[in-house]
Image (cartoon, rainbow, N blue to C red):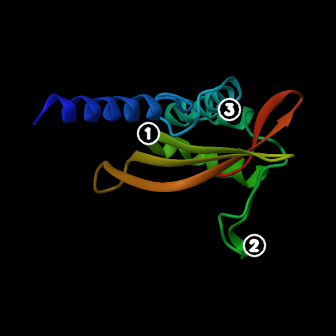
Amino acid sequence: MTHRFIIPCLALALLGLLAGGCGPENIPNTDVPDNAENRAVIDFVEEYRHAVERRDVGGILALVSEQFLDDNGTISPDDDRDYDRLREQLGRFDQLLDVRYEMRYRNIEYRPSRIMVDYTYTASFKIATPEGDRWETRLRDNRIELVREDDQFRIVSGI
């Protein structure tokens, strides 16, 4: 190959790398653009994630709006969960021996009255059973919906 061919190819490759790096940077370990608003949302949801890992029912409920309502993605009202039912279900956290909860944030969408946080989670739970302790793992895509109440984020759906 001649230098006349190699140098233009290298220049094009370098321009391609530079152009690819000109877009907005993502928050590390997420697919979410890095800005103050997105960081605040993720920091809040991370508070929730840590409370889940600690099995801290009070800590979780402190992040949840009393207007919480989750339809579990179905049209049947039988599996709907409001704030009181959520509190009741979280009361069973004491049956868990250990929790590992990881979240990969994929997108944040700002709507007039809500903030939608799309993520993929891996949850592992250690449960005591009569046959001995066992681990269960779940991997799913999910969406947490947030609102602002008194200038603070609160979860209204998605947990």
The residue drawn where x is 57% and y is 37% is 32
Q: Which residue is mark 3?
A: 41
Q: Secondary structure at mark 3?
A: helix
Quick one: label 3 or label 1, which is nearer the N terminus?
3
- Number of callouts: 3
Residue 24 locus on image (x, y percent): 57, 31
Front-most of residues 112 and 21: 21
Q: Which residue is mark 1?
A: 99
Front-most of residues 91 and 20: 20
Relative to residue 5, is residue 88 depicted above or below? Answer: below
Q: Secondary structure at mark 1?
A: strand
Mark 3 against mark 2, which lies toward the viewer? 3
Front-most of residues 26 and 146: 26
**Crowding at mark 2 (Cα within 10 Å: few <14, some 14-19, many 20+):** few
Relative to residue 57, is residue 125 depicted above or below? Answer: below
Rounded to the nearest whole Å, what is the CA distance between mark 1 and mark 2? 29 Å
The answer to whether mark 3 and mark 2 are in CB contact below 8 A is no
Q: Which mark is residue 77?
A: 2
Residue 119 locus on image (x, y percent): 55, 47
Mark 3 against mark 1, which lies toward the viewer? 3
Kindly identify the amino acid type of the residue bearing the numbered disc 1. Val
**Crowding at mark 1 (Cα within 10 Å: few <14, some 14-19, many 20+):** many
Of all residues, the one furthest to the right in this rendering is 150
Of all residues, the one furthest to the left in this rendering is 1
Say left or right for 66 vs 22: right
Relative to residue 23, is residue 86 depicted above or below? Answer: below
Say left or right for 55 vs 145: left
Say left or right for 138 vs 86: left
Residue 80 locus on image (x, y percent): 72, 65
Q: Secondary structure at mark 2?
A: helix
Say left or right for 140 vs 40: left
